[in-house]
Image (cartoon, rainbow, N blue to C red):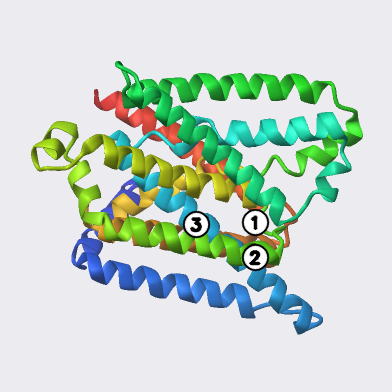
Amino acid sequence: MSPRSAVVRASRGAAERMRAFSPNARLVIAAAIVLLVVACYLVLFLRGSLAFAVPRRLTTLGAMVVAAFAQGIGTVLFHTVTGNRILTPSIVGFDSLYVLMQTLMVFVFGGSVIAATEGIPKLLTQTALMVGFAVLLYRWLFSGRFGSLMLLLLMGVVLGLAFDSLSTFLQRLLSPTEYDLLSTRLFGRIGDVEPSYLPIAFAVCVLVGVVVWRRRHVLDVLLLGRDHATSLGIDHRRELTLALVLIAVLVAFSTALVGPLTFFGFVVATLAYQLAGDWRHRVVLPMAFLLGLGTLAGGQFVLQHLLAARGMLTVIIEFVGGIAFLLLLLRRKGAL
């Protein structure tokens, strides 16, 4: 038997074994594995002062929880309202707007402004600007005569490209020192989050999570499409707008807190669809969060303690996520 045949047979056997578990059992198994991974990250390879190491790891873990919840839940909601599992919330331009705001701040006030303005007011201001941009875009496009979701996505792509072009132009005008200071804010930074940010982040996640969970059955109906949802008594435009606003809050707050994560949500959402064993949101949403948290905690543990690497985990995740995104596109193209 060739190695390829052995791998294919093993993967098929694993898939068959997974089908033997109910969706609830799969959630329990995923939760147990994630708890084990989190425990390993928190207690293993502790060196030096515990009073320093433990709070630092807890802060990093808190940032992982926020990023996993915001990106995982936000991406699943975005797939639901768009009816397309290839798109990501970053297509609306959140990441590009965040990069533009950081670049403008350094270009106008200098590189020292990054450290001087760190704090909760800056976090809330960045989040408010990104959410305000999204709400204005939704209101403008959905209130028009020819407003539609596809037009919204197209405008998001165009505005994102415009923001990227302006950011690139301004970055070329910066001095090498200022650009070096700016570049530290243009990548996801799970391990560099202020502890004072976390209570607000948890409050936002809990609030949005309660709203989403109470509307999980409505979200199930939205999967049927606009015509079927309307025939079942759902105000499709209102639910669509509400879901997009919730997505904007999650993704904007996550981006302002830990930086851009373009493909992370796409990876965990795609895995959640495969492993949940059910299409309903009551299973897919928790699975996406658990997979996101497990990926971040496990990846940070391996990168930091087993490989002794100093690189950013988010850069590796984005690289792998980009490859997975391209492979999914090619597979779907081949199926047409």
Among the 4 quarters of the image, the one containing residue 182: top right
Q: Which residue is found at the position 72% from the left and 22% from the top?
A: 168
For the residues bearing labels 1 and 2, Cβ distance under 8 angstroms:
yes
Report, in whole angstroms, how far the alpha carbon at label 2 lies from the one at label 3: 12 Å
User: Which is nearer the N-term, disc 3 or disc 1?
Assistant: 3
Report, in whole angstroms, how far the alpha carbon at label 3 lies from the one at label 1: 11 Å
Q: Position of residue 313 (x, y in %)?
A: 63, 53
Q: Is residue 39 left or right of residue 144?
A: right
What amino acid is labelled 3 in the image? Answer: Ala
Among the 4 quarters of the image, the one containing residue 210: bottom left
Q: Which residue is mark 1?
A: 190
View extreme (bottom): residue: 50
Circle 3 SS class? helix
User: Which is nearer the N-term, disc 2 or disc 3?
Assistant: 2
Numbered tag placed on residue 60 in the rendering: 2
What amino acid is labelled 2 in the image? Answer: Thr
Numbered tag placed on residue 241 in the rendering: none
Against 82, residue 234 (above or below) is below
Circle 1 SS class? loop
Report, in whole angstroms, how far the alpha carbon at label 1 lies from the one at label 2: 6 Å
Can the viewer see residue 39 in this picture?
Answer: yes
View extreme (top): residue: 146
Can the viewer see residue 301 in this picture?
Answer: no
What amino acid is labelled 1 in the image? Answer: Ile
Against 57, residue 85 (above or below) is above
Foreground of the two, 136 or 288: 136
Q: Which residue is mark 3?
A: 68
Q: Which residue is found at the position 49% from the left and 57% from the top?
A: 68
Q: Is residue 181 left or right of residue 299?
A: right
Disc 1 residue crowd, few under 14, some 14–19, many 20+, Cα 10 Å: many
